[in-house]
């Protein structure tokens, strides 16, 4: 098979397209993995925040109960 100028042009254009596709595909896969990792880290952060807020709610509830008991005692005296 002879490599005519037209055939060389088609191969060159196809080769460039394949290179661009490979670059796009690698970039897409990398960004997709980074996005997945980011979402997982955000979910972990939200879970930690939720646990912390539950702890704070418990502490504030106990403080409110103590304040209410103290107020009742002072009103009864």
Image (cartoon, rainbow, N blue to C red):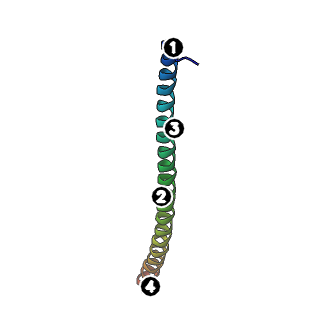
Q: Real-space Cα distance between discs 2 and 1?
A: 55 Å
Q: Real-space Cα distance between discs 2 and 3?
A: 24 Å
Residue for badge 1 = 4
Q: Nearer the viewer, mark 2 or mark 1?
A: 1
Please tell me which of labels 2 and 3 falls first in the chain: 3
Q: Real-space Cα distance between discs 4 and 2?
A: 48 Å
Q: Real-space Cα distance between discs 3 and 4?
A: 72 Å
For the residue labelled by badge 2, is the local secondary structure a helix, a strand or a loop?
A: helix
Asked whether 4 or 32 is in front, the reply is 4
Please tell me which of labels 2 and 1 falls first in the chain: 1
Task: Say above or below: 42 vs 3.
Answer: below
Q: Tell me where residue 30 appears, x and y as whole percent.
A: 48, 46
Q: Residue at x 49, y 27 (%)?
A: 15
Q: Real-space Cα distance between discs 1 and 4?
A: 103 Å
Please tell me which of labels 4 and 2 falls first in the chain: 2
Q: Tell me where residue 66 appears, x and y as whole percent.
A: 45, 80
Q: Tell me where residue 35 appears, x and y as whole percent.
A: 49, 48
Residue for badge 3 = 25
For the residue labelled by badge 3, is the local secondary structure a helix, a strand or a loop?
A: helix
Residues tagged 4 and 2 counted as in contact (Cβ below 8 A): no
Residue for badge 4 = 73
Q: Nearer the viewer, mark 1 or mark 4?
A: 1
Q: Any mark on residue 37, and which?
A: none
Q: Nearer the viewer, mark 4 or mark 2?
A: 2
Please tell me which of labels 1 and 4 falls first in the chain: 1
Residue for badge 2 = 41
Quadrant of the snapshot with the N terminus: top right
């Amino acid at each position: 098979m002879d490599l005519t100028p037209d055939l060389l042009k088609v191969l060159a254009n196809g080769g460039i397209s394949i290179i661009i596709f490979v670059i796009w595909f690698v970039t897409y896969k990398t960004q997709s993995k980074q996005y997945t990792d980011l979402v997982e880290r955000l979910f972990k952060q939200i879970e930690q925040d939720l646990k912390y807020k539950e702890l704070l709610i418990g502490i504030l509830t106990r403080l409110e109960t103590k304040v209410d008991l103290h107020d009742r005692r002072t009103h009864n005296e």
